Amino acid sequence: MSLHATAIALVEAGKGVLAADESTPTMAKRLARVGLESTEDVRRDYRELLLATPGLAEHVSGVILFDETIRQHHASGVPFAQALREAGIIPGIKVDRGTTPLPRFPDEVVTQGLDGLSERFAEYVALGASFAKWRAVIRIGPDRPTAGCVDANAHALARYAAAAQETGLVPIVEPEVLMDGTHSMERCAEVTRQVLRAVYDQLARQRVDLAGTLLKPNMVLPGSESGQQVGDGDIALATVGVLRDTVPASVPGIVFLSGGQSPQEATARLDALNRCAPQPWQLSFSFGRALQAPVLDAWAGRPENRTAAQAALLGRARMNGLARRGAWSADLEPTLLDAR
Ligand code: 13P
């Protein structure tokens, strides 16, 4: 499939991306929350549960895997990536190597992983991946982010995106402005606008073909410690306002991260966003925690909970599928409980 066709397939109507690409330290935190030790076997068992969910392809177009996971197999011996493909789901791979302090910029970070990236891309293609993800992290604080930090991260994202396309992989470009902090929603809008401008400027400089990319941004939200109360409709309007100012219409889709919102909040806001139609791009999801938190709660490492855990994933995916059409409402949520 061409880059353009893959990008379009990832944002097919009613579907979105499952981000299951937690690095090993992050996965250890997620598993510890439900009392589990993070061993390679536990991580494999958990990822198998997610990926083997019957009917997952109905609302999930693609799954982002971690390096360890794309090398793992189902108990039957079939590699995860191959089984996804057979189920009609596109396998993807996280390729950044996390953040590191940005020298001379206190409390700011830059994402690393550009060295040797082309060789790694070639290996991931051989392992079955068709798209990739790189996450940049921007923190809001007094006098932050600095232009130096924004530019360094935007440049790295663009270098990654160009290298991904060169190898035939669709790059998901993820500049995440964190929700942590006391800032207002207006300040989040200002910073997100600044970051996206820098990102699209750098993508153009690095000759990235925008029609073969997807953007994975944060929604525009008040800081998690701000105390500011804002309705979902206002969040959607603020978010769409920033995106319309910054994201070219040739980008086929915008797949939001959940970023620490509760599963239902993330769904409600995706729904509100899709009620602001029409927009030049598909507005979809690439949720990690907002899809997986209820699954981990239901599973808790017990084989007898596997069916309930898969029902929780399917239920969340279905709710987000409705949100993609602006057809979700809170009173549909009990169908999730029924599914359990
Ligand atoms: P969250 O939806 O939990 O923010 O994760 C998405 C993701 O892939 C972050 O890189």
Image (cartoon, helix red, strand yellow):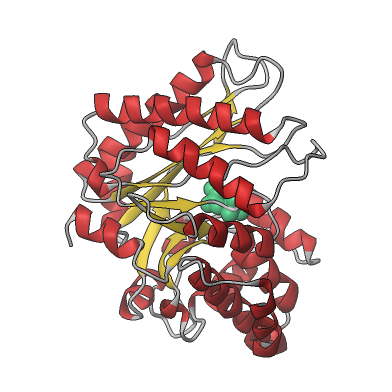
Residue 245 horizontal/vertical position (percent)? 41, 33
Residue at the far top in the pictured view:
104
Residue 75 horizontal/vertical position (percent)? 49, 82
Quarter occupied by the N terminus: bottom left
Q: Nearer the viewer, residue 12 or 99?
A: 12
154 to 279, vertically: above or below: above
Please name the residue shown 66% across and 63% down the image: 263
Please name the residue shown 23% across and 46% down the image: 211
Residue 300 seen in the figure: no
Residue 92 seen in the figure: yes
Please name the residue shown 50% across and 22% down the image: 150
Q: Nearer the viewer, residue 77 or 47?
A: 47
For this view, does 242 lie left or right of residue 205? right
Residue 192 horizontal/vertical position (percent)? 53, 32
Residue 57 horizontal/vertical position (percent)? 41, 78
Q: Nearer the viewer, residue 182 or 279?
A: 279
Please name the residue shown 33% across and 45% down the image: 120
